[in-house]
Image (tube, rainbow, N blue to C red):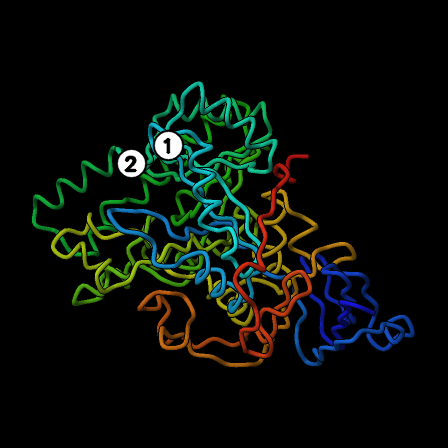
Amino acid sequence: MTGRTVIRGGLVITASDEIHADVLIEDGRIAALAASGTPAAEAFTAERTIDATGKYVIPGGVDAHTHMELPFGGTFASDTFETGTRAAAWGGTTTIVDFAVQSVGHSLREGLDAWHAKAEGNCAIDYGFHMIVSDVNQETLKEMDLLVEEGVTSFKQFMAYPGVFYSDDGQILRAMQRSAENGGLIMMHAENGIAIDVLVEQALARGETDPRYHGEVRKALLEAEATHRAIKLAQVAGAPLYVVHVSAMEAVAELARARDEGLPVFGETCPQYLFLSTDNLAEPDFAGSKYVCSTPLRPKEHQAKLWQGLRTNDLQVVSTDHCPFCFVGQKELGRGDFSKIPNGLPGVENRMDLLHQAVVDGHISRRRWIEIACAAPARMFGMYPKKGTITPGADADVVIYDPHAEQVVSAETHHMNVDYSAYEGKRLTGRVETVLSRGELVITEREYTGHAGHGVYTPRSTCQYLN
């Protein structure tokens, strides 16, 4: 009976099923499920029993878009792999996929090695990597093949941030052609960065320096235009495409059109676009800087179209783009010039709860909650059914979730290493109670019992929607 745990009496929810079942865990994996109260379930024996009566038993969340320790705008994201993965666990997320960065003039391998060094031995939960490709050349393209073979199967490019991460259409096309051959997935930050830079310069010249102008210059039409262009380039290359952090209804329309044509095009949105808006960017006394991220927050009317996209599966995944910068000393770098505000929001701890609130509010079903937060990201990035579901053989990444507990989101009580919450004061119904990662208790009845170094690097197969 070594290393056995049984979770009794909960409602097991996956992307496909809801069943009152007991779950047997052995040696870090799901060993069996049986309907609660049946002889099969009664026969489960273990040293540790967790009572989940009246609770949900769900797969650990998979956050496929985080930036721990990311260098940006002369500073670094405030969460380390240690603090960020601990906060993720508190929020019911048991796997992250973070972005290793290739710097211009350096190899992909150097960037990947640097991120392995940051993460190794420091994570409370399991992790994988995507690769940011900032410098497309013959050597880079060859390296992409090698990375796919070793389980780094997705590559991010930027149509934004000229002079930093930006790739032109030719570089994008070359990388897409390579991924069409090697099975990798191109992830695109779709905003017309060249045009945005012109609008930034013009706004600053007019004396429009407050955070709200960040949203005004990064126009929804320039997100839609770049999304359309990325889709067409992918079509020319015969490659699949995943558009990250979709925020605008016009961009959703481009994705929907491409998917209606049968193209292998996918989209992700983030909680900030579903729950926040330009109203937050306009908060007085520079407080709007807390909400500066790219793509930017949009006017409220975009939210309904994003929820609709999640219901119709024109958007498949909700990730956080977790990239926190403290208000004091980091966001404040942009006082008097919105273009110098570090771009990014904290959210890795809030995603599962915010999406459960969306269930309560009637935007999505319980199973869709699990699909967009657990199963779809695991499938998209080659980790299913090891991650993202509760089925025999899967890693025992399991969350006991209390759907009736009430909480108020606050920087006072969150575990992310940042001095504000993007959702300060928001009342939510539903809360994580206990979290297991590969059968080990990381959160035990609202107490952190995990440790840095439990989380292991997880190589990934290619996108499972394309097989």
Res. 331 image quadrant:
bottom left
Q: CA distance from mark 2 to mark 1?
A: 8 Å
Percent coordinates x, y for residue 264 in the rendering: 57, 34
Q: Quadrant of residue 210?
A: bottom left
Q: Secondary structure at mark 1?
A: loop
Q: Is residue 33 left or right of residue 402?
A: right
Q: Is residue 315 above or below residue 231?
A: below
Label 1 sits on residue: 134
Helix, strand or loop for disc 2: loop
Name the mark on residue 279: none
Residue 42 % position (x, y): 87, 76
Disc 2 crowd rating (10 Å Cα; few below 14, some 14-19, many 20+) is some
Which residue is pictured at 38% across the width and 75% down the height?
A: 410
Q: Residue 63's x, y, as percent?
A: 52, 54
Question: Pointers 2 and 1 in contact (CB under 8 A)?
Answer: yes
| Quadrant of the drawing holding the C terminus | top right
Residue 74: x percent and y percent? 24, 47
Crowd class of label 1 (few under 14; some 14 to 19; many from 20; radius 10 Å): many
Q: Which quadrant does the N terminus fall into? A: bottom right
Q: Amino acid at mark 2?
A: Val
**Image point (72%, 55%), residue name:** 394
Looking at the picture, which amino acid does disc 1 mark?
Answer: Ser
Mark 2, residue position: 164
From the viewer's side, name the closer residue of 399 and 20.
399
